[in-house]
Every structure is written in C-alpha cells, then in structure tokens.
Image: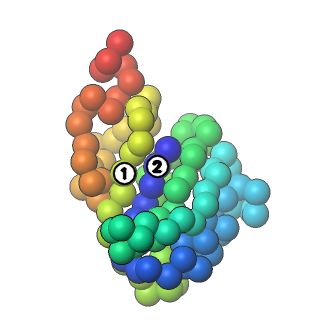
Amino acid sequence: AFNVNLNTKDLTVAKGIARAIREQHGGLPGVHAIGVPLASRGHVQVSINITDHEKTSIQTVFNAITKEAQKYEIPIHNSEIVGLIPESAAFPDMAQYLKLESWSDEKILENLL
C-alpha cells in the first residue's frame, strides 16, 4: 500500500483524487484508491494499492496525485509506504521525491530475504 497525505481536512478532495486515479474510473492501470480522513493528524489521505508496479510505477501514481491535488490548490503533506516493496519498484532519491514520512532499505523485500 502507498498512502499520500494531503494538507487539507476536506475529505471530498481525497475522494475526488482517488476517483480520478483509480483504474475502475478510467485512471491508472492496476491502481485501486480511496479517500480517507485522518482526523488525529488533521489531514485526509489517498490510500492506494498498486497491483502491478511494472504497469504503473509508484512515481507515476505520485505524479498523478500531485497533478490532481494542484487542481484543488492543495499541497501534498507527505506519503508513506505500508509494508514492503520489490526492489524493482524503488528508484534513486525516492524518499525525497515521494515526500516519504519514513524510509529505510528494510522496506525493500529483497533486502530481507
């Protein structure tokens, strides 16, 4: 899972972005997304599952969310990777590019095998 936290409390923004990027509604291939509130953090989140990172990379998803968020004039607060990702999904300077809340090489599956 890949979560992107938006710098707003407006859940309609997160839901609108999720709808725009999800495959089911003509968005990105292999992408499932929903908008959820994070009341304790004062943000909303676009929660994403990427089912095939070779069809649609995490960078492509982040770029699409950034573009959609700009339509609402809402900045991205940060993002997080939940669980592990394959090494082939990682890229140089990924932590900075994706505004990852926390990152370590232990998030890469192959490094734990």
Asked if labels 1 and 2 touch by Cβ distance under 8 angstroms, the answer is yes
Q: Residue 102 location, x and y as percent? A: 25, 48
Asked if residue 23 can be seen in this view, the reply is yes
- As drawn, the residue found furthest toward the front would be 40
Q: Is residue 69 above or below residue 54?
A: below
Query: In x, y percent, where is residue 38?
Result: 43, 66
Q: Residue at x 34, y 41 (%)?
A: 91
Residue 20 in the image: above or below residue 47? below
Specify the label residue 14 is tagged with: none
Quadrant of image for the C terminus: top left
| Amino acid type, residue under disc 2 in the picture | Phe
Q: Residue at x 32, y 18 (%)?
A: 112
Tell me what residue is drawn at x 44 percent, y 87 percent. 73
Q: For numbered disc 2, what is the local secondary structure?
A: strand
Residue placed under numbered mark 1 in the picture: 80
Dot placed on the residue nearer the N-terminal end, 2 or 1: 2
Q: Point out residue 65 in the picture as x, y percentages from the top left corner.
A: 50, 66
Rendered image coloring scheme = rainbow
In three-dimensional space, the C-alpha distance between marks 2 and 1, rounded to whole angstroms, equals 6 Å
**x and y percentages locating residue 53 in the rendered image:** 54, 39
- CA neighbours of label 1 inside 10 A, class few (<14), some (14 to 19), many (20+): some
Vertical placement of residue 74 versus 46, above or below: below
Q: In this rendering, would 15 be left or right of 37? A: right
Determine which residue is flagged by label 2: 2
In the rendered view, does 94 fall on the left or right side of 11? left
